[in-house]
Image (tube, rainbow, N blue to C red):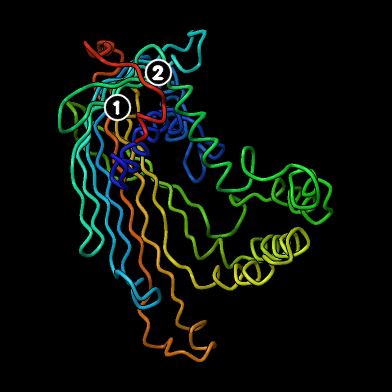
Amino acid sequence: MKSRLFALFMLLIMIAVLVPAASAQTDVTCLGLNGDDCAIITAANENTAKIQSFTQAFTFDFSVSGAGAMTGGTDGVSLKANGSGPFVIDAAAADPSAMVSMAMDITGSADAGSDNQSGSISVRIVDGIIYVSDPKTGEWKGAKLADLLSSVTDQMGAMTGGAGGASTSGTGGAAGLASNPAVMGLASAAMAFDPVKIPGFLTQTREADADMMGQKMVAFNYTADIGALLTSPEFQKLMSQATTAATQADPQAAQMAMMVPMLATMATGNFNYTRWVGADDGFIHRIVFAGDINLDLSAMMGASGSSGAQMPPINMKLNLTVDLSEINNTAAPVAPEGATIVPASEIMG
């Protein structure tokens, strides 16, 4: 199972757990809406945050094209997956890892030129144990979810030079970064940075109603204009501070950090975040994240003396659709019979 496809499956499972909760939390709930629409989406957020069980189905589609001209490798990469299953939430669980029980069957594919993978996987989380079935033998293996998450955290720390990776003493460790004035100034600026206030960046509208899942649905859509954010004076100032902080914290990172503000001016596109609210029951039943981003590097490549003018833009597309049904009327998943409990590393492998 050591494959990019398996990593995709694990990522999607984590997204599946977080999406319903995240959909009910935002600091700009009523942005651009009239009083009646504000009341609808506010009540829907509150109702959805209290959901105790649901059946979830999702589709995921991500693709990158146009990168081959720059990397000299595969021009296009695509990841696709779909899955469904029940979720039960126990907010009173003493063990945080046992708060969510779920069962999900996922099918997906990963394509990168001649390197293609496809397959399916079944996953269950019950009483703080995550179970994964072997797609070839059907054998179930389980490990403590807390151990798996800890293992993932340790690996990320080692990759980024954090806990378990780099030393926390000296100018190159966490202590050195914490005492660096430029880094502290950047942290303060990042805390004060509010992208919602950037003119033209974020808008929200009520879309046309639709009939689905046996009732009328009211749709609310956020649109985030990436170009408006990245080219704004406020964001460029933050990036300039980040460059200074990176240079002082690690001189070797200076050249790379200086490219970030320039790259920001070359990105255009938008993200859309849409929620469909049931007019009858007041729950959020469909959540869609969609993105279409272009990165035009031709100007930078031209400045470096290469044939950048002939380079096509790098395009990235994302679509994640999540449907919630049988809300508060879903049976709790159960642990698979005959599962073998193993170390978390074996589940990952």
> Does residue 9 sit above or below 126 in this rendering?
below
From the viewer's perspective, tell me whether residue 267 is left or right of residue 122: right
239 in relation to 279, above or below: below
Looking at the picture, how far across and down is residue 131, in whole percent?
31, 21
Q: Residue at x 64, y 38 (%)?
A: 163
Q: In this view of the protein, which residue sits in the foreground, 285 or 258?
A: 258
Q: Nearer the viewer, residue 340 or 272?
A: 340
Q: Nearer the viewer, residue 258 or 296?
A: 258
Which residue is pictured at 48% across the width and 84% down the height? 301
- Which quadrant would the C terminus be assigned to in this image? top left
| Image side of residue 176 versus residue 17, left or right | right
Element assignment for label 1 = loop
Comes first in the chain, label 1 or label 2: 2
Q: Residue at x 33, y 71 (%)?
A: 73
Looking at the image, is mark 1 or mark 2 nearer the viewer?
2
Q: Residues within 10 Å of mark 1 (few under 14, many from 20)?
A: some
Q: Which mark is residue 36?
A: none
User: Which residue is drawn at the image coordinates 51% and 38% (left, top)?
Assistant: 30
Find residue 100 and report its horizontal and vertical position in percent: 40, 18
From the image, tell me which residue sits under label 2.
100
Callout 2: few (<14), some (14-19), or many (20+) C-alpha neighbours within 10 Å? many
Report the amino acid beneath label 2.
Val
Quarter of the image where one finds residue 168: top right
Q: Is residue 335 left or right of residue 118?
A: right
Residue 84 is at least partly visible in this image: no
> What's the residue type where badge 1 is placed?
Ala
Q: Quadrant of the N terminus?
A: top left
User: Dot 1 corresponds to which residue?
Assistant: 279
Residues 267 and 344: in front is 344
Gap between marks 1 and 2, in whole Å? 27 Å
